């Protein structure tokens, strides 16, 4: 810390702070337009000019000048005030005075500073700019006439998003922000540029003309898409969520959001929301009252025992999952599960046997503290984009080395000095085992490894996974595998990252144990090290922590089979859409068609809900109270931002009422259930809604390491067929994002992605309609031809109901298909 004086006030600040940061820490306001705490100092706007006595009173920018011990600073002398007024006059010289129709009105830094400094006239005159306004983008409007050249949009796109869609063009008075070749904005549509723009130059089109910012009520919440656990602020007016409001001080990510979080909120107030219970009568779903619907459901569940089952989305709050589990146990059934039964196996089976815990022994903040990141599948950026931003910053700002093991290239492959090994689909586990074998052979294992249970069995089992043997089946060189192993073992801090979810059946217990073996073998635990398993949905980790998966009963796959065989007669599905999100659509549809009684609680009339006998309208995350647990076990409290839509009820209320109708007793409030969670779930002890506050708390993970001997598994290619792999696309998460207007503007339908080489061989052009067929079924999808795909491999996202890939996808890590026009 250093001692300094600001405006005659003795203060202290970190030795690496700038004058601006030192002032802000000590509650002294310095005006600024070009600064954001996530970005590197830039010094473009000159609004933050201050005087430093040791520099003979010279005016210097506070945002780029580091503090020194004994520095004497003055922030608001008459000369400084005069200089700031002149800066504002120069900014307003070419800036259109169209505040009455500018959507940024009330939230515009330039407008506020002009008012604060009483700049009511301008000594300078010049012609206003007449740049063409870009309305072509459905999410982001660009009006460069209003731009003050702070550069924040270009800097955040480069430094954090690492896309580089925007940059400075031309020189002098003609300088402006633009895209390459003066084209339209075509990017990731994360909206980061919109969030940091201090004026109305970049606007979120979905919010345009909806309300003034001062008319909004801001409610802090947690994003309900992926498992990153991003904090967000919902802007509410007239019981409608109209936008997300940027707050650079919110969350570990400092307000940074992806396309889904920033532009996918529209599902909350969608006109397609279910608003009243429906009961099937004479083959038609008919509006009914809650009493009638719940009495019917309770009568089917009462005494049903093992003939009843439940499938849940991991989007439910922890408290709701506890009640859902209690409901099934009250009905006498242990048949409950989530995420197709296999999508949580990496945690519930793999980590459970390797770490003695069903959670990751690393956190998202560890990413920027690591020396080496080993990422399994480039999809890690698409599944969890804000985690991808953390990887970007670790590599570009902190110098972390990035090694990627994937069946295709991707966004992360483009980062500086990143090394991507593109392997044959389905071979990642074998390659990781070969890395462990190389570490043993090169004597790079930690000295304590031999004392850990299972070491002898691991050493014996790895004999069949030499780099030379695995190289043949994986399409990689033995030298490349050995180099990855050496890089990982010799790094001071190394972190392994991989995604799991419905679309990644190959990321299973075997993969989890294989990467766990690597970490245990090299002793890579602690700050900046370990393994981070990125579960798909916002509360996937919570669903595991609450025990909502098969332990003594049937798992999701067995439940579907039970519906088909008649063993399961009553099925309650909460928020899940297995007709679209589970593999082998024909088999799932047939099973749900055969079950005697199907109950679905959901926000929308999904493909699954349309098959139900009773449909219950549920509330979104913005309408209820509870907690979510992120991929790194950060527990966060959410509260209602709006009132319930129509006659919908929270899942907590639905399950509680049904428990009471079955003769059980349910806690009256989510807070009471969280009290039970804190008393019984490992790591949650001592937590309460009050202690969680706005920032949440980490549930610690205690590792009891054990080596798990791998089993040989080879993916055999099928002659004359292409390898289809499924996954997530950047703009979507599960099937919920289909109801968010923003994501659907950018990516409205499914597609099949193939290499240029395969396209040339098959004479396929971009957007050709292709018939993709496997032993499971067939579907028609548009072609997308890209350079990132290796020959012989196809990729398709799994989110879409129309022409869904699960009509072809078998549920295996690799589905062998044929493609015809």
Image (cartoon, helix red, strand yellow):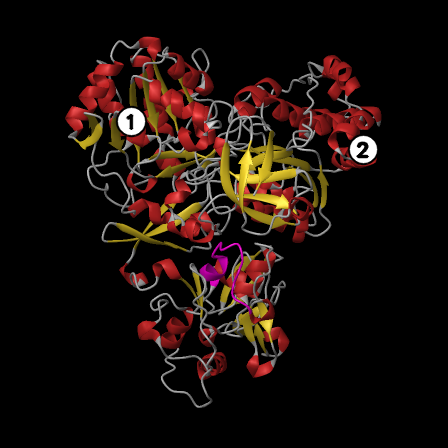
For the point 38% across and 73% down, the residue is 111
Q: Which residue is mark 2?
A: 482
Residue at 17% from the left image edge and 29% from the top image edge: 290
Which mark is on residue 278? none
Mark 2 falls on what kind of element? helix
User: Residue 192 in the image: x percent, y percent?
Assistant: 49, 57
- Compared across the picture, whether 764 is left or right of 317 comes to right
Residue 676 appearing in the image: no
In this image, 262 relative to 520: left or right? left
Which secondary structure, mark 1? loop
Q: x and y percent of residue 702 in the render?
A: 56, 24
Residue toward you, 442 or 815: 815
Q: Give the residue displayed 55% in from the left and 68% down from the top.
A: 183
Q: Quadrant of the C terminus?
A: top right
Q: Nearer the viewer, residue 24 or 721?
A: 721
Q: Residues within 10 Å of mark 1 (few under 14, many from 20)?
A: many
Main secondary structure of the magenta stretch = loop
Rendered position, 669 above or below 183: above
The quarter of the rendered structure image containing the N terminus is bottom right
Task: Find out whether residue 197 is within the magenta segment.
Answer: no
Q: Local crowd at mark 2 within 10 Å, few (<14), some, or many (≥20)?
A: many
- Residue 674 position, x and y percent, is 35, 27
Residue 192 painted magenta: yes
Residue positioned 36% across, 47% down in the render: 220
Position of 189 with respect to 431 (left or right) is left
Query: Looking at the image, is mark 2 or mark 1 earlier in the sequence?
Result: 2
- Magenta residues span 183-196
Q: Which residue is mark 1?
A: 612
């Amino acid at each position: 810390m250093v001692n300094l004086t600001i405006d005659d006030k003795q203060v202290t600040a970190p030795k690496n702070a700038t004058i601006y940061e030192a002032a802000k820490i000590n509650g002294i306001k310095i005006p600024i337009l070009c600064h954001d705490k996530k970005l590197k100092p830039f010094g473009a706007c000159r609004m933050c000019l201050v005087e430093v006595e040791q520099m003979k009173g010279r005016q210097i920018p506070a945002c780029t000048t580091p503090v020194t011990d004994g520095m004497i600073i003055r922030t608001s002398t008459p000369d400084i005030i005069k200089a700031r007024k002149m800066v504002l006059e120069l900014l307003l010289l070419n800036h259109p005075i169209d505040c009455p129709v500018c959507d940024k009105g009330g939230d515009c830094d330039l407008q506020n500073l002009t008012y604060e400094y009483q700049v009511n006239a301008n000594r300078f005159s010049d012609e206003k700019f007449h740049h063409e306004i870009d309305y072509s983008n459905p999410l982001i409007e660009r009006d460069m006439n209003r731009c003050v050249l702070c550069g924040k949009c270009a800097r955040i796109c480069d430094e954090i998003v690492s896309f580089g869609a925007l940059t400075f063009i031309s020189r002098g008075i003609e300088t402006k922000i633009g895209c390459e070749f003066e084209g339209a904005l075509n990017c990731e549509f994360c909206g980061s540029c919109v969030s940091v723009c201090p004026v109305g130059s970049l606007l979120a089109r979905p919010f345009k003309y909806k309300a003034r910012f001062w008319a909004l009520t801001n409610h802090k919440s947690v994003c309900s898409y992926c498992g990153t656990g991003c904090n967000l602020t919902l802007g509410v007016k007239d019981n409608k969520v109209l936008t997300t409001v940027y707050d650079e001080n919110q969350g570990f990510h400092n307000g940074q959001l992806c396309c889904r979080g920033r532009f996918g909120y529209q599902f909350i107030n969608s006109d397609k929301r279910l608003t009243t219970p429906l009961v099937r009568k004479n083959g038609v779903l008919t509006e009914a009252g809650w009493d009638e619907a719940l009495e019917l459901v309770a009568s089917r569940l009462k005494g049903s025992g093992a003939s009843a089952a439940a499938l849940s989305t991991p989007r439910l709050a922890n408290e709701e999952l506890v009640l859902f589990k209690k409901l099934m146990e009250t009905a006498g059934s242990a048949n409950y599960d989530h995420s197709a039964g296999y999508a949580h196996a990496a945690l519930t089976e793999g980590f459970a046997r390797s770490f003695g815990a069903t959670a990751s022994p690393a956190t998202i903040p560890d990413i920027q503290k690591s020396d080496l990141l080993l990422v399994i599948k480039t999809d890690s950026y698409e599944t969890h984009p804000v985690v991808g931003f953390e990887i970007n910053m670790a590599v570009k700002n902190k110098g972390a080395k990035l090694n990627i093991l994937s069946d295709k290239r991707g966004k992360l492959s483009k980062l500086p000095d990143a090394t991507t090994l593109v392997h044959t689909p389905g071979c990642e586990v074998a390659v990781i085992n070969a890395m462990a074998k190389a570490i043993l052979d090169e004597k790079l294992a930690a000295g304590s490894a031999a004392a850990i249970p299972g070491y002898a069995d691991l050493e014996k089992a790895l004999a069949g996974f030499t780099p030379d043997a695995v190289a043949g089946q994986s399409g990689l060189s033995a030298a490349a595998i050995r180099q990855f192993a050496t890089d990982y073992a010799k790094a001071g801090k190394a972190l392994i990252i991989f995604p799991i979810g419905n679309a990644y059946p190959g990321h299973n217990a075997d993969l989890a144990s294989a990467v766990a073996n690597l970490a245990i073998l090299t002793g890579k635990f602690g700050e900046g090290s370990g393994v981070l398993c990125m579960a798909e949905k916002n509360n996937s980790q919570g669903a595991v922590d609450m025990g909502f998966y098969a332990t003594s009963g049937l798992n999701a796959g067995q439940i579907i089979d039970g519906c088909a065989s008649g063993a399961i007669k009553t099925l309650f599905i909460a928020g899940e859409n297995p007709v679209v999100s589970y593999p082998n659509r024909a088999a799932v549809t047939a099973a749900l068609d055969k079950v005697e009684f199907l109950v679905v609680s959901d926000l929308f009339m999904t493909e699954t809900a349309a098959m139900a006998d009773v449909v219950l309208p549920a509330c979104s995350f913005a309408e209820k109270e509870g907690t979510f647990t992120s991929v790194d076990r950060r527990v966060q409290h959410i509260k209602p931002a709006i009132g319930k839509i129509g006659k919908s009820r929270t899942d907590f209320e639905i399950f509680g009422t049904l428990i009471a109708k079955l003769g059980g007793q349910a806690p009256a409030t989510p807070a009471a259930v969280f009290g039970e969670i804190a008393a019984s779930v490992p790591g949650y002890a001592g937590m309460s809604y009050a202690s969680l506050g706005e920032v949440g708390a980490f549930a610690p993970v205690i590792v009891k390491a054990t080596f798990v001997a791998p089993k040989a598994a080879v993916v055999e290619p099928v002659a004359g067929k292409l390898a289809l792999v499924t996954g997530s696309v950047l703009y979507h998460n599960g099937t919920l994002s289909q109801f968010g207007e923003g994501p659907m503007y950018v990516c409205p339908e499914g597609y099949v992605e193939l290499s240029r080489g395969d396209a040339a061989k098959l004479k396929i052009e971009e957007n050709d309609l292709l018939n993709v067929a496997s032993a499971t079924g067939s579907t028609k999808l548009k072609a997308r031809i890209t350079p990132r795909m290796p020959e012989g491999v196809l990729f398709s996202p799994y989110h879409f109901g129309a022409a869904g890939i699960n009509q072809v996808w078998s549920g295996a890590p690799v589905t062998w298909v044929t493609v015809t026009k």
